[in-house]
Image (spheres, rainbow, N blue to C red):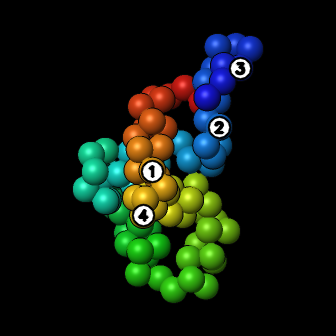
Amino acid sequence: MTTDPPGQVQNLTDPDISPAIASHVLFHFQRGGVPGPLFYRRLLTAIEVGSADQRAALALAFSGWVKAFELAADRDGGGPSRLVRISRMGGRR
């Protein structure tokens, strides 16, 4: 994480994953966070149950969501911890 000139914090893990997305994905995986609106809860279910091809298609429109989902699923690589750090960034990016 670095600080941009106006004092904004840049998310170096992936700029497509906002703190809100990270928080909603963490909730989906029952690792804290907060539930998102119904559309995004269903989107996460679609990402979860979709095939690799379907997930790739969803990533075209919802790249941050798919990337965050894959991070959350990567428990051995520390993905959930990275999402927690992103979610704690609040509105700062």
Checking the image for residue 73, the label placed there is: 4
Task: Residue under label 1, please give it.
Answer: 78
Residue 41: x and y in percent read: 35, 63
Mark 4 or mark 3, which has the lower sequence index?
3
Q: Work out whether 86 lies above or below 90.
A: below
Task: Residue under label 2, please give it.
Answer: 12
Q: Kindly report the distance in space between the C-alpha atoms of the residues bearing marks 2 and 1.
A: 15 Å
Q: Amino acid at mark 3?
A: Asp
Checking the image for residue 16, the label placed there is: none
Relative to the observer, which residue lies in front, 61 or 74?
74
Q: Secondary structure at mark 1?
A: loop
Q: Secondary structure at mark 2?
A: loop
Which-is-in-front pick, marks 2 and 1? 1
Mark 2 or mark 3, which has the lower sequence index?
3
Q: Kindly report the distance in space between the C-alpha atoms of the residues bearing marks 4 and 2.
A: 19 Å
Q: Kindly report the distance in space between the C-alpha atoms of the residues bearing marks 4 and 1.
A: 9 Å
